[in-house]
Image: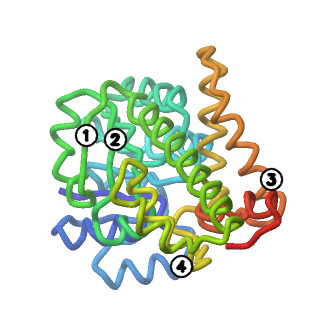
Amino acid sequence: MKIGFVGLGIMGKPMSKNLMKAGYDLVISSSKPETNKELGEHGAEVVDTYIDLAAKSDVIITMLPNSPEVKEVTLADGGLIQGAKPGTVIIDMSSIAPIASQEIGKELKKKDIGFLDAPVSGGEPKAIDGTISVMAGGDQDVFDKCFPIMEAMAGSVVRTGEVGSGNSTKLANQIIVALNLAAVSEAFVLTEKMGVDNQLVYNAIRGGLAGSNVLDAKAPMMLDRNFDPGFKIDLHLKDLNNVMETSTDIDVPLPLTASIRETLKALTADGNGEDDHAAILKHYEKLANVRI
């Protein structure tokens, strides 16, 4: 089985390498010559166009920034839809608006091309070690066919319903992560002001009810002031913009999400958009005039 891969960035490149480690033949097309060279040396076949990539692939994975890019690569003139054979499956592992996923799925279905919206969680470290979490929406038979492929890149692969449900689940994930990061930041700013050692605070609370994967992944980064991006603030803001767009479309008030989105906007305005989202801490430090 040949797998096409489009979107070989901070997440896509390690994911593609894990597919090759699992024994899959890969076809790629990147705008970056150095990426084509690197993955070509790992055994990937490099082609010039998305049409060529689709024609050579049984399953195609896209890992792109947002809805417009996925629509462009998939449906536009010169896109995957023009090269894909009937029976091909496209797995979009980007984090985009659920309604956009449904629109893409409908267009692909007209050409007898299967589709899963299957965004991921875990950031670059888990993409590298192959333990990302995948939340997939689509027909059960398409999911079953593609499960081993997704499993080769992931620690968890769960079907959450029909097309669109994958990205709906990812939006829920991003709300919870953002608000957890805000809570940890506020707590650390409070205890810092009170003169308590935050390393000891972390050690004390991580085993109790306040403990979480978010706390364990991001508190050490905050305490070390290591904001090298595993998942950028700009990308989290993009996801929360999709949350709020969707909430407007379906008339669901999300006051906490609206608030943390404003925090991310402020961080971006202050020049922190390329930092890891653990740098949410900086906003609360600024408010309290304290540095962890």
Asked whether residue 78 is in view, the answer is: no
Mark 4 or mark 2, whichever is nearer to me: 2
Name the N-terminal-most of marks 1 and 3: 1
Question: Mark 2 to mark 3: distance in Å?
Answer: 30 Å
Name the N-terminal-most of marks 2 and 3: 2
Q: Amino acid at mark 1?
A: Val
Q: Which mark is residue 266?
A: 3
- The residue indicated by pointer 1 is 158
Q: Note whether 232 is above or below 111 in the view shown.
A: below
Circle 3 SS class: helix
Question: Mark 1 to mark 2: distance in Å?
Answer: 5 Å
Circle 1 SS class: strand
Q: Position of residue 40 (x, y in %)?
A: 36, 79
Q: Quadrant of residue 169?
A: top left
Q: Which mark is residue 135?
A: 2
Asked whether residue 289 is in view, the answer is: yes
Question: Mark 1 to mark 3: distance in Å?
Answer: 34 Å
Question: Mark 4 to mark 1: distance in Å?
Answer: 34 Å
- Which residue is painted at 24% across and 36% down in the image? 87
Left or right: 196, with 136 as reference point:
right
* Residues marked 1 and 2 touching at CB (< 8 Å): yes
Name the N-terminal-most of marks 4 and 2: 4
Circle 1 packing at 10 Å, graded few (<14), some (14-19), many (20+), is some
Mark 2 or mark 3, whichever is nearer to me: 3
Q: Nearer the viewer, residue 100 or 213?
A: 213
Left or right: 151, with 161 as reference point:
left
- The residue indicated by pointer 4 is 33
Q: Position of residue 73 (x, y in %)?
A: 53, 47
